[in-house]
Each structure stands twice: as structure tokens, then as C-alpha cells.
Amino acid sequence: MIGFKSFADKTRLEFEPGITAIVGPNGCGKSNISDAVRWVLGEQSVKALRGSKMEDCIFNGTDTRKPIGMAEVSITFADCEEKLGLDYNEITITRRVFRSGEGEYFINRTPCRLKDIQRLFMDTGIGTVSYSLMEQGRIDRVLSAHPEDRRAIFEEASGITKFKADRSEALRKLEHTEANLLRLSDVIREVKRQIGSLQRQAAKARAYKAIHDEMRRLDIHVAREHIKALDARIETAEKRASEIAACILAAQEEVAAAEKQTSELRSALMQTQREISAEAEAAARSQNRLDHGLEMIRSNRQRIEEHQAWAKRDEAEIEANRVQLEEKKRELDIISSSLAALTAEKNDAEKRMNEALAALEEHLRSLEETRSALHSLRSEQVEADNMYSRLQNELVELESRQRNAEISRERLLAERSQIARSASELGKKLSETDAAAAAAAAREAAMAESLARAQDEVSQAQRRLTECRSAVEAVRAQEASLAARLEMLSAADPSSDFPQGAQALIAGACPDIKAGENMLGGLAGRIRAPREYQAAMETALRAYLDAVLVASERDGRAALSFLEKGQKGSARLMFVEAGQHPLPEPPPGTTVLADVVQCDEAVAPLVRRILGNVLVVESDRTPHPLLDSEGNSVAPNLAERCEHVCQVEQHFGPGQECHDIFSIEDWNLPGSGLLDGMTYRFQLSAGPPQQDLEIELWRDPQEDLPVGNHLSPR
């Protein structure tokens, strides 16, 4: 022990086999040792430990020592393996409590529960409520206790307490298992209900996924066909561009041929100019010759006639030359006009060709940009038909096709954006569908797992239920065996549990009372009840089962005198000839317990008075006008319905002397304020100090009968 009540320091006590007495002056802590044993074995009642709260068990300090924050008690049992059914030769039980209210239990320094300790010592006689610990006054209380209260001690000694605890535990587990089965049934029903819905959702998800896959396949097929068409158009455009390039090369060749022809025409023009110059020189020479001839004519007129033919011939020649010169001049003018026209036409053609080439280069650049923007899509080019007019027409056609290509590019870009948006939306829908399908599959798998787990739990619960039922059957068999044993034990002698004085009176030891005539024996042996009413009868007659029946008050006085003179012990007496009073009719829906019990005719009036006001209902939960919602009685004027029982209880032991003998006509319960009170006192001397007993009597004003209520030591 350490820190427990007055044991501040660590204290070790050894109890050897045999009897060990602990002696000492008052207040030295002898009772604290028994309190420590009771406390370490699991006592929960602070009142039983002579305290007001559990903190009182901890050393609270003195003038010279500080309080301790913990109390600990350990008890060790040796050579207990056979009694406790363990493999250990020694076992140590430890209990520890802190000022914060926390408590700990240990078995061989291993943490455990209070239930484990209680179960360990069950059926061994060691425990907080067993017969191994007897404090002051416990023996007297056991001797004067009711049979039902003493039954627990005999059950503990006979070894059936553990079976009763096992039975209660098995019944509790059975109820818990049945409740779990109900919950599992609800869970299985809910899981089955959800499985159908999830299966439908999974089927819809699979159908949606199949449709989505088909739609995706069709979209891919359409996109592939569209790409093929675009590739065909690109190939056609490339072929057209090749043809246009060939046409451009042909046009360039024609331009080169035209330039060559122009060069040839220039050469011919220069040759013609040279010829014209030569003819002009010849004409000039002819003019010179003409002038020389005229000069010769003027100088030599004689030779005119001689040379007149020559002159006519020369004139004809000059005229012919002049005509030829005019023709040459006209040809030169025509050639010059043709040359100027050809030059202008050449310049115009070169200008238009340069413009067409620039436009063609710009268009080719635009086509290349369009082709890059559309991922290898090339625009069409305009065909050049001829060197002059066809180039202009082809340029216009190329510009028109460029505009169409821009429109097609914009349309393709719009289609591409639409396809991208559609693909994005379809991707999102596909992701959502995949996620939903995955979630549904996960939920379905989880539900299937939950169903399998629930089925396993159901199987385990059914297996546990079977085991519990087997345990219950075994416990019931043990209970039947124990009940038969108890019935056999109870059938032996009902008066064996009576106090010593009562047994002496029943045995006929009192010479002033005739056995069988005035001494009627115990009440327990003269009353019986059906099995379903036996518990109610035992509860109602708990205080009277060990009573001794006498015929009259005179016989009671004789019995009291005999017990007093012979120091025979205590006895509870009941007078059969006590006054009789009519009882009212019971309320509807109830059964008077006196109507269902069986007894001898000699004690029938007494039993009627005792049980006439005991009403039996099916359960305290059954709605009834005499019971509230908690099963408590709410009947007014309960004193008017009380039984009238004559009872005298007295204890006589060594050294006690009766100074006054009294009789009570009627003994009853208090009457809810309807009775006026009177108090009578008498004295029993048991040596120093004397013990005063006080009896309070109330009088019923309607029947003018005293009704006893209370007997207590002053």
C-alpha cells in the first residue's frame, strides 16, 4: 500500500496461512487495512469505504507532510492456480486512483478492466460482496437477513454465480447479436436496393460509353475523310500550280522569243535605216551628179544635145530613183511606225508581264502563307493563256481564286475551330462519362465488397448466434440443473434458514405453546403460488417468509417470555387471530395476488390480509391508472387499502432483559397523512450502554384502530 488513507509510505503486509490478528489502539488504521483489501478487489461504493468521495481514499496530508496525488494498493495471492484456474503460482491485483478521478486496474502489472478482476474471483468467495470479507455488524445482518438476501451468499459458495454471470453475458451478447442481425438485414436490404440502381446506372454508362466510342470513331472517320478530301484538293492545287508554273515558263519562253523577234526586227530596222542611208547617199550622189550635169550643161551646151538622151535617161533614172526613194521613205515610215508600235507594244507587254510576274510572285507568296496556315494547304494559281491578254485575264482569275482561297481558308479555320470546340466538348463529356463510369464501377465494386463483407458479417453473426444459442442452451441446461439442485435444497427444510429463536419455537421447545395447535410453524411452508406468480409472491412476502405463526397474542407473549428467559435468539412472530377488515374490489385490469396463491385454511385469513392489497399487472410498462410513466404508484388514500397484519419482532441475546412487553393490534404502512400520530417508548437493557427502542404508532380516525409503522433504535 502507498498513499491509501493513512498509509502515506509504502507498506507491505504478509498474511501467513492460519489466523492473523491485527490489534492496535483506536484510530491507528486497522479498518483501513480491510478497506484497502475491499478497495483493491473492486469496491465502487465510497460509503462502504467509510468516505464521501473516492478522493478520500488518497492520503490527504498532515501538519508535517504534504498530500499525495495517488493511492495504490496491490494484493498478491500465492498457491492459487487451482482455485483461480490459472497457470501462475502467484497473482497480483493492483488498483490505482489519482486525484483527477482517473483509475487504473492491473493483473500482474498488466492493465485490465474491473470486470476482468471481478470475473477472476467469481465463485471463489473473494470479492466485495462475498462472504470472505465480514466487517462489523455484517454477521448479525446475515443472520437476520431475508432468505432472498442470503441466497446470494449460498450461490457464491456453491459456485453458480459465475454461471449466472455467464448466462447474463450470453443473453446480453445474444440480444446484441440479434440487434446486429437486424441492422445487417437493413444494411443488406439497402445495399441490394442500391445495387439495382447502380447496375442500371452502370448499364446506362456502358451504353453511353459504347455510343460515345462509336460517335468518336465516326468523327475520326469523318475527319479522316475530310483530311483525304483536303489532301486531294491540295494535290489538285499543286498540279494546277505545276501547270501554272509550266504556263509561266512557256510565257517566259514566248516573251524571250518575242524579245528575240524584237531584236531581229530592230536589226532589220537598223539594216533598213542603213539601206535608206545608202539610198540617200546614192540619191545625194545622183543629185550631185545631176548638179554636175547641169553644170556641165550650162558649161557645155554643145554637149547637151549630145548628151540629151543621156539626160533624159538620167532624168528617167532620177525619177525612178525618186519614186524608189519615196517608196523607200514610205517603207521607212511604215517600218518606223511598226517599230514604234512594236516598241510600245513591247514596253506595254513588258510592263504587263512585270506586273503579272509581281502579282504572280505576291500570289505565290500568299499561297505559301495560306499553305503554311492550313498545314500544307496550297492555293490555286491562275493560268496564263498568252503573253499579253491572257496574262491580264489570268491575273484577274488568280485574284478571284485568291479571294476564294481566303474564303475557303476562313471557312476551314471556322470548321477547324468548330471541330476543336466539338472535340473539346466531346473530350469533356468523355472525361465526365469515364469519371462517372469509373465512379459507378468503384461504387459498384464498393457495394459488392460491402455486400460480401455484410454477407461475411451475417455469416459470422449467424455463426456467433449459433454459438450464443449453444452457450444459452448450455447455460439453460446448467440453470435447470442448478434450479433442480436449489429446488432439492429448498425442499429439504424451509425453516433451516430461519433465525435461531424461530427454529427453537418451530421445534416445539416452548412448553407453554402446543405444537401444531397454537404453534403453526413458518409462513413459508404454508403458502404456495403458480410459477408465473412465484416472483411476485416472494417479493410481497419478503419480510414475512421467516415469520413464525402463533394462534393468539397470549401465545406470542409466551414465546417472547421463553426466548427472553432461555436466551434462544431472535424470532419474528405473527398472530393468526388478528382483526379482520373487509377489502375493496380491485381495479379493472389487475389481479389480486391473494386470489392466485394457495395456503392452508388456518392461515388463509392472514394471507388474505397480507396479500389482499397487492395488485399484479403484466409489467410496470403496461399503462394502468394506478401507475405513472415510470411504474410508480399514484393511487391516493393508499392507507385505506393497506393490510392489517399483527406482527411483533424482538431479538433476545446474551445479557439482554425485557423491561416491558407490548402488543400491537394492527401493524401497517403509513397512511399518506390520514392518520394522527402517537408515540410509545420502551427500553431494552443489554448491559452498559442501554439501547432505547422507539415505536411510533398511528391511529386510523375512521376505524379507531392503532396502526404500527416504525421500530428504530434511538
Image: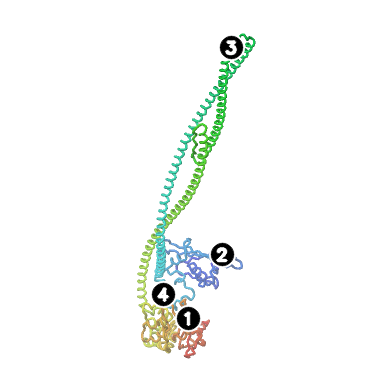
At label 3, the amino acid type is: Gln
Q: Secondary structure at mark 1?
A: loop
Look at the picture and state if 535 lies above or below 97. Answer: below
Circle 4 Cα neighbour tier, 10 Å, few/some/many (<14 / 14–19 / ≥20):
some
| Residue bearing mark 3 | 308
Amino acid identity at mark 4: Arg
Q: Amino acid at mark 2?
A: Gly
User: Callout 1, which amino acid?
Assistant: Val
Q: Which residue is mark 4?
A: 151
Say which mark, if any, is on residue 69: 2
Q: Cα distance, mark 2 to mark 1?
A: 49 Å
Q: CA distance from mark 1 to mark 3?
A: 190 Å
Residue corresponding to mark 1: 634
Q: CA distance from mark 4 to mark 1?
A: 32 Å
SS class, disc 4: helix
Query: Can residue 564 be seen by looking at this rendering?
Result: no
Q: Nearer the viewer, mark 3 or mark 4?
A: 3
User: Residue 484 appears at what percent x and percent y?
Assistant: 35, 73
Q: Position of residue 387 (x, y in %)?
A: 51, 31
Provide the secondary structure element on which disc 3 rests: helix
Q: Residue at x 44, y 39 (%)?
A: 232
According to the image, what is the colour scheme of the structure? Answer: rainbow
Mark 1 surroundings: few (<14), some (14-19) or many (≥20) residues within 10 A: few
